[in-house]
Image: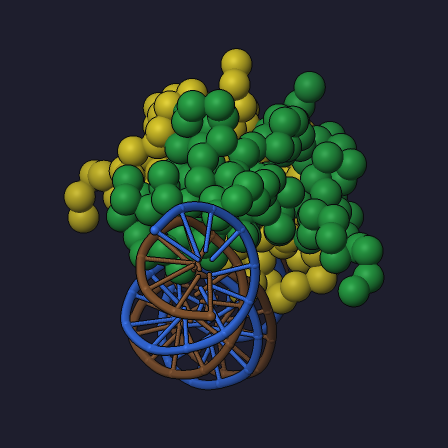
Chain colours: A green, B yellow, C brown, D blue
Amino acid sequence: MPVATLLPLTDVTACCAPITREPLGAHDAETLAKTLKALADPARLRLVSMVAAHDGQEACVCDLIEPLGLSQPTVSHHLKVLVDAGILSRDKRGVWAYYAIIPGALDALAAALTTP
Amino acid sequence: MPVATLLPLTDVTACCAPITREPLGAHDAETLAKTLKALADPARLRLVSMVAAHDGQEACVCDLIEPLGLSQPTVSHHLKVLVDAGILSRDKRGVWAYYAIIPGALDALAAALTTP
DNA sequence: TCAAGACATCGACAACTGTCAATGTCTTTG
DNA sequence: CAAAGACATTGACAGTTGTCGATGTCTTGA
């Protein structure tokens, strides 16, 4: 398994200048779109905000299923999308998998959307 | 035709607190997701940045087709999605339709993603 | 070693999305 | 009025996505 696949699929942190500064190249647009797509879903937005608001800024899947109102496989799927996008981190401790927001990820995304 | 459909389909400006402050409600998540979905496409991201970087912060469809490399109907379609999401405005002058970024729209979106 | 439980993965299916060719609408100009 | 041109709309199609039930994997505790 190549190392690259262990890294976030989309690294928006070092992606591109704010989109209102200069025309976005095709490649940068693809990268930024992938990250935005990961966030552009009601269930995933709620997951991110639930994780952020949880005690210790982390939460396990079992904390998220019931308030979200979706099945366990679906919640796992959404969390995987967010991890692959570099928005959440996953830390397996014992039987539980704890998810947390990667510091700076959302800010980097926001920065790409605005004029500084 | 009810008046409501003339307004932006998603009004993220007055949508919700930053998603990292408190768990997002189902309705707010839906609203925010709709706006993000509008932006979460490479072609539309490039359109937004091309419009922003164009002379006078506005551009007509004919300015955008060739650099984007997509067909005219497809470009029109993407522009409509962005207008419906409240990100771009459309101003028809003569034969041309000029699109511009609605001031504050992207900033409101960015603000919803970060802790202030 | 076995049972229970937390989580991930798989397979399937309906719904949605991006794209284009063809066509329609409306404005300008000859 | 007729022709040309800018843009929107329609219809169709392939590809993607969100969801769930069923099943697999791994850890803990008896």
The answer to whether one can see residue A100 in this image is yes
Q: Residue at x 40, y 52 (%)?
A: A75
Front-lying residue, A7 or B12: A7
Front-lying residue, A73 or B111: A73
**Compared to C17, does A15 lie above or below?**
above
Name which quarter of the figure residue A103 lies in.
Answer: top right
Q: Residue at x 62, y 66 (%)?
A: B71
Q: Residue at x 56, y 32 (%)?
A: A101
Left or right? Give the position of A110 relative to A1. Answer: left
The answer to whether one can see residue A42 in this image is no
Q: Residue furthest top?
A: B116
Front-lying residue, B96 or B77: B77
**Compared to A103, does B49 lie above or below?**
below
Q: Residue furthest left?
A: B2
Name which quarter of the figure residue A76 lies in.
Answer: bottom left
Q: Residue at x 33, y 46 (%)?
A: A65
Residue B27: x and y, percent?
27, 38
Name which quarter of the figure residue A46 lies in.
Answer: top left
Residue A67: x and y, percent?
28, 40
Front-lying residue, B74 or D4: B74
Left or right? Give the position of B84 relative to B63. Answer: left
Residue C12: x and y, percent?
38, 83
